[in-house]
Amino acid sequence: MSNLFKSLFGKPADLKAICQDGAIILDVRTPEEFRTGHITGAINIPVDQVKGVIADLKKKNRPVITCCRSGARSGMAKSVLEAAGLEVYNGGSWVSLEKRIR
């Protein structure tokens, strides 16, 4: 079964390396959720406000890794940013992403 997923979706991105190369970590939870804990250096833009920062993110010319509580909202944000032409990765939950990149 694992080989089937690999053939369908390819090798997972090395988020640690992407982060070390200067990626922006975009936490798309609410400000209240963000205050309860987050990845150091992450930018907090709630998912419903992501469209409004596309131009600013494009100016930075860096990959974006999205995260949230479970991975659902970060997946939605990834879709929006990807459609706008950005290089973006869904990091899933901020807790699991933090473990993957440290």
Image (cartoon, rainbow, N blue to C red):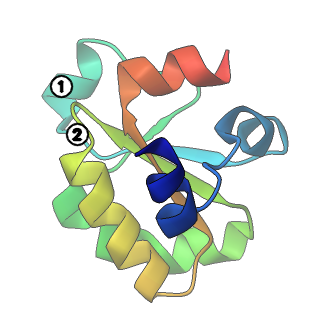
Mark 2: secondary structure? loop
Local packing at callout 1 (Cα closer than 10 Å; few below 14, some 14-19, many 20+) is some
Q: Is residue 4 left or right of residue 49?
A: right
Which residue, as the protein is rendered here, is positioned at the far bottom? Answer: 84
Percent x, y of residue 28: 29, 46
Residue 34 location, quadrant: top left
Mark 1: secondary structure? helix
**Residue at coordinates 46% horizontally, 57% vertically from top-left?**
4
The disc labelled 2 sits on which kind of residue? Arg
User: Toward the viewer: 75 or 27?
Assistant: 75
Residue position for label 2: 29
Q: Is residue 33 above or below residue 70?
A: above
Residue 8, visible in the rendered structure: yes
Q: Is residue 32 left or right of residue 7?
A: left
Q: Quadrant of the C terminus?
A: top right
Residue 20 location, quadrant: top right
The disc labelled 1 sits on which kind of residue? Glu
User: Toward the viewer: 64 or 75?
Assistant: 75
Q: Is residue 53 left or right of residue 99?
A: left
User: Toward the viewer: 66 or 4?
Assistant: 4
**Residue at coordinates 22% horizontally, 39% vertically from top-left?**
29
Disc 2 and disc 1 in contact, CB within 8 angstroms: yes
Q: Is residue 29 left or right of residue 19?
A: left
Residue 15 location, quadrant: top right
**Residue at coordinates 18% horizontally, 25% vertically from top-left?**
33
Percent x, y of residue 54: 46, 76
Residue position for label 1: 33
Percent x, y of residue 19: 72, 39
Q: Is residue 98 above or below residue 77?
A: above
